[in-house]
Each structure stands twice: as structure tokens, then as C-alpha cells.
Image (cartoon, rainbow, N blue to C red):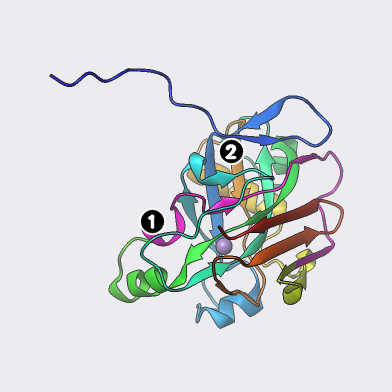
């Protein structure tokens, strides 16, 4: 009989800016189509509220590591997103109390196998292989944050060329609304990350591309597609 070692799985972590302790990732929730211009470029329905999908916790790629180009796709896309790090448990949280759960914010890229997503959409099948693959969630260090949510520019460039350049103010659902809604669908707990959707300008990446993302006041994220 084969021998298997039974050991606890390692917990993925994201650094916290200026601190020795890292943020242990419990799970990753993602909002779809939360900017009107991106919803339009995806052919989304203007009347539909934004929706959630998930990635596994070990999809995170902390700063300093490069994500691998995934298998089985010919069309890997970048989606820069503000990421909310949850630091307090909560369920059914009203909008006006939602910010109490927020530990801080980070810059993330929701990497997407766009061809697999389009095929799944067309067939009414789930998105997991299009969104929740290995290395699909590069992220910056988390910045602790107690004030009103970030509201500045959100930008991404590839090899020095601007691809996405918008403002967080263009979000359809704001941060308290997203956290509140997520808490009605799941019990939120410390370690949860919420990707809050991407603005327009998503596009393809190929191996060797250098990706630079920035959210004003939150931080920067740089990686190369390996
Ligand atoms: Mn996204």
C-alpha cells in the first residue's frame, strides 16, 4: 500500500505593509462586472446587479513572485481590482456597519482564461477553470486602513503601455455595499479577500509581459508573466 503523509495544508499568506506578521488567506470572493464600461465590454446586462464568484485561497501570488502562464488557454486576460481584506467576522451585516469588518486594502489582478470563460458563459457552465486556476490572483501587500475607502485612480500597464486607467468612483456597488452583500451570501471571517471588480480595458497577456498595477493611496503591484 502506498504511504501518504498526513499533514496540515500550508496556509497562503499576503504580507501586511510595514509589519512582520502576514495576513493568512481564508478564501477569495470576487465581484463580477462592477464598472459600467467593463460590463458593456463583456456584453453584460445593464439591469442586473453585480454577482460573485470565487477563487481558491492558494490562487494568491504574493508580491515578489511571478504567476505562471496557465495551461489550456490561448487568451489570458488581466483585470486590475481593488481588494478588500476582511479582518473581523460578520454575517448579514448592514451597509452602514460593513466597513467595521475591513482590515485593509490591496491591489490585485484577477487573471482570467477569457477563452474558457466565454465558452462556459455560452454553454451556461461554471467559471471555475476560467477564474479559479493556480496563480490566478497576484496581489500586493495589504495596507491597513481605518478611514473612508480608497477613491482614487486605478491603473494597469503592460510593458509600459497603459491598458486600464479609471477611477474607483466608477464602481457600480461601493465597498460597504459589496461587503454587506457578500456577508448575506457567506459568513465573512478574518482572512477573506474580496476582489471588487475591474474597470474597462481588460486585455490579453503573453509570457514575458511585465504588468504594473497601481491604485492611488493603496499601493503598487508589479509582476512578469512567467
Ligand atoms: Mn474580475
Nearer-N-terminus badge (2/1):
1
The answer to whether residue 2 is above or below residue 195 is above
| Residue at figure coordinates x 56%, y 42% from the top left | 183
Q: Quick check: is 147 in the magenta stretch? A: yes
- 52 sits left or right of 142 in the view: left
Q: Quadrant of ligand 1?
A: bottom right
Q: In which quarter of the image is residue 213?
A: bottom right
Q: What stretch is highlighted in magenta?
A: 129-155
Label 2 sits on residue: 192
| Residue at figure coordinates x 69%, y 45% from the top left | 63
Give SS at disc 1.
helix
Q: How crowded is mark 1: few (under 14 residues within 10 Å), some or many (20 or more)?
A: some
For the residues labelled 2 and 1, the Cα–Cα distance comes to: 18 Å
Asked whether residue 99 is in view, the answer is yes
Asked whether residue 96 is in view, the answer is no
The answer to whether residue 97 is above or below residue 120 is above
Looking at the rendered image, the quarter that the N terminus falls into is top left
| Residue at figure coordinates x 73%, y 48% from the top left | 106
Label 1 sits on residue: 128
Q: Nearer the viewer, mark 2 or mark 1?
A: 1
Q: Looking at the rendered structure, which numbered label has been put on residue 4?
A: none
Residue 76 picture location, percent across and down: 50, 68
- 148 sits left or right of 6 in the view: right
Q: In which quarter of the image is residue 71?
A: bottom left
Q: Is the magenta stretch mostly helix, strand or loop?
A: loop
Amino acid at each position: 500500500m502506498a504511504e501518504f503523509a498526513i499533514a496540515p495544508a500550508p496556509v497562503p499568506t499576503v504580507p501586511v505593509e510595514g509589519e512582520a506578521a502576514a495576513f493568512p488567506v481564508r478564501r477569495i470572493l470576487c465581484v463580477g462586472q462592477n464598472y459600467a464600461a467593463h460590463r458593456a465590454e463583456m456584453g453584460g446586462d445593464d439591469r442586473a446587479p453585480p454577482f460573485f464568484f470565487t477563487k481558491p485561497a492558494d490562487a494568491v501570488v504574493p508580491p515578489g513572485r511571478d504567476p505562471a502562464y496557465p495551461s489550456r488557454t490561448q487568451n489570458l486576460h488581466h483585470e486590475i481590482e481593488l481588494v478588500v481584506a476582511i479582518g473581523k467576522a460578520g454575517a448579514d451585516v448592514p451597509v452602514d456597519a460593513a466597513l467595521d469588518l475591513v482590515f485593509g486594502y490591496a491591489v490585485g489582478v484577477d487573471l482570467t482564461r477569457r477563452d474558457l470563460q466565454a465558452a462556459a458563459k455560452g454553454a451556461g457552465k461554471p467559471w471555475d477553470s476560467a477564474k479559479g486556476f493556480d496563480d490566478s490572483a497576484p496581489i500586493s501587500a495589504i495596507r491597513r486602513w481605518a478611514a473612508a475607502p480608497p477613491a482614487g485612480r486605478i491603473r494597469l500597464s503592460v510593458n509600459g503601455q497603459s491598458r486600464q486607467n479609471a477611477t474607483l468612483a466608477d464602481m457600480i456597488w461601493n465597498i460597504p455595499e459589496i461587503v454587506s452583500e457578500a456577508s448575506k451570501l457567506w459568513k465573512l471571517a478574518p482572512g477573506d479577500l474580496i476582489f471588487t471588480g475591474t474597470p474597462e480595458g481588460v486585455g490579453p497577456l503573453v509570457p514575458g509581459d511585465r504588468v504594473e498595477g497601481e491604485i492611488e493611496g493603496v499601493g503598487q503591484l508589479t509582476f512578469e508573466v512567467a
